[in-house]
């Protein structure tokens, strides 16, 4: 079972975002318990180039407005064991990203922030069981395709890069148009358990 | 694909390290089953570098109220008031800061898989990973061990990372390269029997010269300063040895223990110092348990006498000197031939970077490049990119620094423009290394249980503001150093900065206000030659204005050639305080609510999250630590039995008895070796023949289990035999506990 898995949804092109503005927003989520799971603290890594930005540390996983790859997005990485299958686990991750996206887009202090939900990056952070190799990708492709189908319907899967040192990351691109509300509906059954 | 990291890396880990990690994993299981006392486990955990973090007591102030954090493992703890599931910190030792490319890549993998994709360089040249779950630590340690890195004794009451000048070997002013000597001492003291019974931590540093900051030997428990002397026309290498320095709440300058010790003597003298510290150092009062208090209390002459007496009594150890013949003339080899920088096109920004981040080595045609890390942080992606850059330009000649940066050594000068472009492209090309923008900060309230104010938040703010003004700043200001600690414990080394800050708090009406005490005039050079003076506390949010006022006045009033320390002395504490007075009067909350917040935190400021720090470790007897290893070995024997590996089950149960016997012997005789014959012989003489091991009913029965097994291994290895041996080992361990309690009057938690 892959334990450390994650998904990232990208912010729409042209979003002008001050990372510092996210700190009170995420602190507020902790106060009001606005995301599922045990939320612990907010970490500020906005000084790091292409780094994890502002991170909401949780027990089950960490959620960040992340600047990795030079593209801002909402990243959720599940870090503790979960009972679900890989597709179910990934759906729970992406739902966490979608819920955060909904909160961020609704927040008056972040007027320019928009999330583009047509592409999801899947991250399998486990070099023992899922090294970044064509073979590992091929072995996991079936389960990833189930996840992609349940999220988007028709979608394509591409290995994000071929540096064997990196995590195995897969870009899932929707064939059709989707919006946040629609994807929240499609993932409504996903569970954090 | 491999089933586990343990199986995959079995052949790549040093056997001893692998075994230690297995023991730690066994101790974790014992703790989960509540068969190991939480205090003993806490110290065990700390000695594996597994440290607590803020909020691990299971509660957090969210800005409105303190709320419980309901972790899934419920009441299971990994130490007093430390919840099992709470995110923690893993510290990783990097002796003398030396890193290989393989290590850099492994560190990046680990931070990505177990932490938050950030690697943090500490003020002791270590790395720290934050938000780690304790369950992940054994595999993390195995993956480190496979590339030659250990976490052993990175925390706890033992010898911490041995640091050294990051320029050692390439410095233009060094006496000689201290790297091999620091590596030898780090290796010798790691896990050494004589460093297991300290009342507090113990920090060691090596410096190649006297006048630069180098390795800051004056603020270390044990410091080595390279010296040579002429003996019959030949140059002899050695060290001036310093002892009893330290920062903390009460900074002490180190004193000279030995004016000149030959290289052959540095290991045995360090061992003797360790024994003196273990024997005479304070154990009950943690606030006075560092060696600096012992030196201050008995006086350096008496301390020296004790060490010299101890040195005479030490049993000879080949390990003291058997490494010396292998010390190479040059510790490192350059990847490329040295070439001068001559007429090559210079990219934009290069000249500023060149001025502050490039140091010309003593070897012509080569330079050291400092990679300036904001707040000591580097992302996992950047670390891999930096590994690639190292591969292209310098190979494994990479080191961390106590200023929380990374240096690339042996860069051919002709490659500097290309190297700058490469660093810039991955966000690692910031100029200003070693200047006022290169601010050192401890973790503070971000993650530290003791943090009072946000040292990292303040450092980030000041760095951002100063970087904007850097181009127009007078050189006298650019060259100043700022260091920030989140509390009075000095992890940010504020005492040895020109301008230091440490966190505290004040009250205005019913509200707390985060503050920083301003400490001025510390000296970084001369190996931390003098400590700064606390002036006054100002609100955290006022610090940027305070800094502007201070530096403006320094520039305006300094006399020709007058440095900052001299100017502060001339100005005097009274005048400095008067200058800061306008910021010390606190308004009512309603007048300026922003002042009541800390940097980088939108919550109403509270000190309610401060917990009990683990810097001091847990004061646990040497016996408790050692017997817990025997119990872990016994637990592994049970696992082997369950798996049907009867040979291993029997072997481990025998090993558990030996470890238990040794734990007991070491309460009387520290020098017992690891050899089974020695252990059994000493145990027999001291505890069996004297009947100290005997209890009222069983007499010496359980000891005879050990003697019988030691004399003869079982002829068969089946389930029944293995089970019997395991039960005997259990009874022997129990009897050892009882004997220790009878003899020493210390009740330890029975299994």
Image (tube, rainbow, N blue to C red):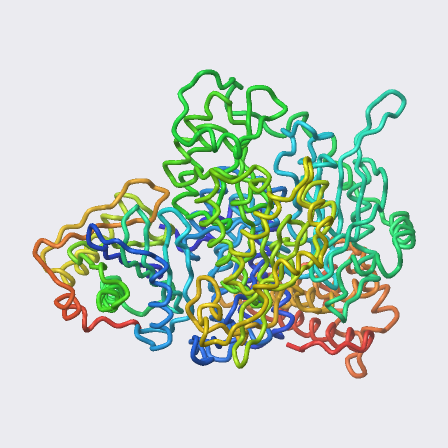
* Residue B636 visible in rendering: no
Q: Residue furthest front?
A: B556
Looking at the image, which is closer to me, B457 or B167? B457
Residue, x 34% and y 73% (percent of image)? A37
Residue B164 position (above or below residue A47): above
In the rendered structure, the answer to whether residue A117 lies left or right of residue B524 reads: left
In the rendered structure, the answer to whether residue B606 lies left or right of residue A149 reads: right
Q: Position of residue B302 (x, y in %)?
A: 91, 54
* Residue B23 visible in rendering: yes
Residue A154 position (above or below residue B262): below
Looking at the image, which is closer to me, A84 or A153? A153
Q: Position of residue B8 (x, y in %)?
A: 44, 49
Q: How many marks?
A: 0
Looking at the image, which is closer to me, B542 or A7? B542
Residue, x 74% and y 59% (percent of image)? B711
Q: Position of residue B709 (x, y in %)?
A: 71, 63
Residue B393 position (above or below residue B656): above
The C terminus of chain A lies in quadrant: bottom left
Q: Residue furthest bottom?
A: B697
Q: Residue furthest top?
A: B343
Residue, x 66% and y 36% (percent of image)? B179
Q: Position of residue B579 (x, y in %)?
A: 62, 58
Looking at the image, which is closer to me, B741 or B634? B741
The N terminus of chain A lies in quadrant: bottom left
């Amino acid at each position: 079972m892959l334990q450390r898995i994650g998904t990232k949804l990208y912010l729409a092109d042209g979003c002008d975002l001050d990372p510092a503005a996210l700190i009170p927003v995420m602190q507020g989520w902790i106060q009001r318990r606005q995301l599922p799971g045990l939320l612990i603290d907010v970490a500020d890594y906005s000084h790091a180039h292409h780094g994890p930005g502002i991170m909401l540390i949780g027990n089950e996983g960490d959620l960040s407005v992340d600047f990795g790859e030079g593209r801002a997005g909402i990243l959720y990485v599940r870090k503790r064991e979960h009972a679900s299958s890989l597709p179910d686990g990934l759906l729970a991750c992406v739902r966490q990203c979608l819920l955060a996206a909904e909160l961020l887009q609704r927040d008056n202090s972040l007027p320019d922030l928009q999330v583009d939900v047509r592409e999801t990056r899947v991250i399998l952070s486990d070099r023992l069981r899922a090294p970044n190799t064509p073979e590992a990708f091929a072995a996991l492709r079936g389960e990833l395709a189930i996840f992609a189908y349940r999220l988007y319907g028709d979608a394509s899967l591409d290995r994000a890069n071929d540096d064997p040192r990196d995590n195995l990351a897969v870009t899932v691109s929707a064939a059709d148009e989707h919006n946040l509300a629609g994807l929240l509906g499609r993932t409504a059954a996903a569970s954090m358990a | 694909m491999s089933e586990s990291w343990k199986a995959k890396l079995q052949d790549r880990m040093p056997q001893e390290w692998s075994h230690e990690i297995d023991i730690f994993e066994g101790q974790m299981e014992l703790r989960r089953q509540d068969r190991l006392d939480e205090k003993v486990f806490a110290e065990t955990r700390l000695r594996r570098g597994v440290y607590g973090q803020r909020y691990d007591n299971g509660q957090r102030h969210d800005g409105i109220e303190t709320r419980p954090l309901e972790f899934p493992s419920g009441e299971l703890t990994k130490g007093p008031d430390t919840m099992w599931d709470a995110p923690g910190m893993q510290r990783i030792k990097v002796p003398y800061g030396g890193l290989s490319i393989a290590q850099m890549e492994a560190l990046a993998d680990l931070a990505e898989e177990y932490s938050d994709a950030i690697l943090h360089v500490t003020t002791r040249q270590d790395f720290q990973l934050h938000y780690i779950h304790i369950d992940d630590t054994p595999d993390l340690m195995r993956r480190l061990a496979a590339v030659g890195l250990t976490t052993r004794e990175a925390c706890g009451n033992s010898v911490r990372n041995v640091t050294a000048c990051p320029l050692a070997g390439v410095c233009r002013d060094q006496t000689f390269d201290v790297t091999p000597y620091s590596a030898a001492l780090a290796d010798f003291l790691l896990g050494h029997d004589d460093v297991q019974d300290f009342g507090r931590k113990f920090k060691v540093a090596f410096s190649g010269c006297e006048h630069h900051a180098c390795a800051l030997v004056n603020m270390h428990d044990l410091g080595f300063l390279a010296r040579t002397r002429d003996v019959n026309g030949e140059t002899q290498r050695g060290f001036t040895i310093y002892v009893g320095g330290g920062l903390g709440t009460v900074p002490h300058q180190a004193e000279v223990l030995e004016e000149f010790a030959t290289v052959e003597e540095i290991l045995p003298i360090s061992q003797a110092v360790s024994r003196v510290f273990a024997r005479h150092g304070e154990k009950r009062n943690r606030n006075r348990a560092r060696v600096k208090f012992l030196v201050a209390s008995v006086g350096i002459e008496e301390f020296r006498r004790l060490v010299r007496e101890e040195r005479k009594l030490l049993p000879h150890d080949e390990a003291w000197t058997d490494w010396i013949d292998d010390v190479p003339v040059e510790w490192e080899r350059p990847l490329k031939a040295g070439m001068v920088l001559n007429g090559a096109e210079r990219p934009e920004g290069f000249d500023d970077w060149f001025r502050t981040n490039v140091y010309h080595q003593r070897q012509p045609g080569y330079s050291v490049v400092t990679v300036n890390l904001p707040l000591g942080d580097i992302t996992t992606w950047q670390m891999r990119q930096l590994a690639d850059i190292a591969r292209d330009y310098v190979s494994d000649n990479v080191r961390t620094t106590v200023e929380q940066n990374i240096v690339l050594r042996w860069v051919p000068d002709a490659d500097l423009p290309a190297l700058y472009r490469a660093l810039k492209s991955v966000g690692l090309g910031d100029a200003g290394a070693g200047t006022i923008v290169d601010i050192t900060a401890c973790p503070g309230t971000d993650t530290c249980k003791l943090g009072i104010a946000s040292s990292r938040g303040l450092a980030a703010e000041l760095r951002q503001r100063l970087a904007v003004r850097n181009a127009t700043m007078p050189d006298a200001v650019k060259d100043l150093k700022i260091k920030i600690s989140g509390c009075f414990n000095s992890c940010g080394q504020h005492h040895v900065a020109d301008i230091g800050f440490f966190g505290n708090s004040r009250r205005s009406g019913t509200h707390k206000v985060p503050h920083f005490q301003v400490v001025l005039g510390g000296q970084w050079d001369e190996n931390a030659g003098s400590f700064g003076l606390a002036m006054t506390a100002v609100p955290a949010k006022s610090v940027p204005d305070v800094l502007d006022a201070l530096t403006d006045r320094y520039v305006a009033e300094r006399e020709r050639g007058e440095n900052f320390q001299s100017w502060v002395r001339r100005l005097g504490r009274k005048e400095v305080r008067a200058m800061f007075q306008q910021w010390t009067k606190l308004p009512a909350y309603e007048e300026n609510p922003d002042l009541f917040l800390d940097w980088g935190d939108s919550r109403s400021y509270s000190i309610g999250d401060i917990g009990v720090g683990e810097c001091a470790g847990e004061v646990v007897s040497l016996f408790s630590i050692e017997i817990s290893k025997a119990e872990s070995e016994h637990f592994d024997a049970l696992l082997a039995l369950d798996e049907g590996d009867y040979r291993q089950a029997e072997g481990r149960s025998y090993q558990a008895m030996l470890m238990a016997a040794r734990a007991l012997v070491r309460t009387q005789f520290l020098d017992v070796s690891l050899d089974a014959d020695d252990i059994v012989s000493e145990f027999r003489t001291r505890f069996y023949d004297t009947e100290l091991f005997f209890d009222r009913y069983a007499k010496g029965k359980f000891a005879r289990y050990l003697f019988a097994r030691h004399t003869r291994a079982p002829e068969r290895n089946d389930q029944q035999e293995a089970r019997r041996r395991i039960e005997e080992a259990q009874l022997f361990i129990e009897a050892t506990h009882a004997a220790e309690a009878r003899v020493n009057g210390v009740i330890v938690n029975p299994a």
